[in-house]
Image: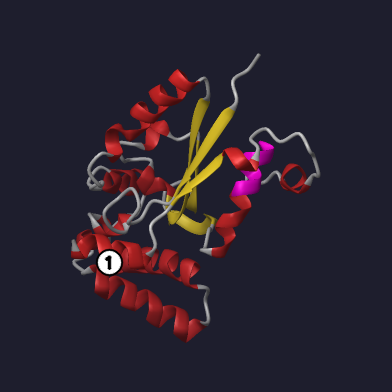
């Protein structure tokens, strides 16, 4: 008999990492502060009417092009090596996996983020996730971004609760995620979401 599954879904920015994932290395590589980068994103989105998540992906490409930086997949993965995590995060996964084993359950970890999947791929905790859902670029034959491949804004995150519950993990599996099936792979009562609100982060930093 298979073990019951407990799925933990995580936000990334300010939840696992101490700030936005782009702030540790990517934005400094442009010679910008985080405030300047996000101000450029806001300006672009307001000027064009572009959705803000798509706006920041465009700003990443544009600012790299201005500086002659080739924003390849390998370049983005390298930025992930500089991410700083909250104390206890890097050994959390093995600890909770062991605890789950002791309790007779299998623990699965999923990341649901509006950040860059390519940056996450370079960080120390990437190996622990069964699936990473984030914004991704489509790269050409020169390994340079030409189009957003996947985009996840704030309200789009809710679909991944259903994907995990139903086992429809492929983002292109529209049939599986919409199918009515009372026999869920992971009951919703076995799904835990971990995220930090901006208010919570402010309170943590004030302590």
Tally of marks: 1
Horizontal and vertical percent position of residue 177: 72, 46
Q: Residue furthest right?
A: 180
Any magenta on residue 205?
Answer: no
Examine the image and state in which quarter residue 94 appears: top left
Say which residue label 1 marks.
202
Horizontal and vertical percent position of residue 133: 51, 47
Horizontal and vertical percent position of residue 80: 30, 45
Name the side, left or right, on which 104 lies relative to 1.
left
In this rendering, does residue 150 appear at all? yes
The magenta region covers 161-168
Name the side, left or right, on which 67 lies relative to 117.
left
Picture quarter with the N terminus: top right
Examine the image and state in which quarter residue 38 appears: bottom left
Q: Residue furthest bottom?
A: 47
Residue drawn at x 45%, y 25% is: 100
Any magenta on residue 164?
Answer: yes
Image position of 185 with respect to 42: above or below: above
Q: Secondary structure at mark 1?
A: helix
Examine the image and state in which quarter residue 99 appears: top left
Residue drawn at x 79%, y 44% is: 179
């Amino acid at each position: 008999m298979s073990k019951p599954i407990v799925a933990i879904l995580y936000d990334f920015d300010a939840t696992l990492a101490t700030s936005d994932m782009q702030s540790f290395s990517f934005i400094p590589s442009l010679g910008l502060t985080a405030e300047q980068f996000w101000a450029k994103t806001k300006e672009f989105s307001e000027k064009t009417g572009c959705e803000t998540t798509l706006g920041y992906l465009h700003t990443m490409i544009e600012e790299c092009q201005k500086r002659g930086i080739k924003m390849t997949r390998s370049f983005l993965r390298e930025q992930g090596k500089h991410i700083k995590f909250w104390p206890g995060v890097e050994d959390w996964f093995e600890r909770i996996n062991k605890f789950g084993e002791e309790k007779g359950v299998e623990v699965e970890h999923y990341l649901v983020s509006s950040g860059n999947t390519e940056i996450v791929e370079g960080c120390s905790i990437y190996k622990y996730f069964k699936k990473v859902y984030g914004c991704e670029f489509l790269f050409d034959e020169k390994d340079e971004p030409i189009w957003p491949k996947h985009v996840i804004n704030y309200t789009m995150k809710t679909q991944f609760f259903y994907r995990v519950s139903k086992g429809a993990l492929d983002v292109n599996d529209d049939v599986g995620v919409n199918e009515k099936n009372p026999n869920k792979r992971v009951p919703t009562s076995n799904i835990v979401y971990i995220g930090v609100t901006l208010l919570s982060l402010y309170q943590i930093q004030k302590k």
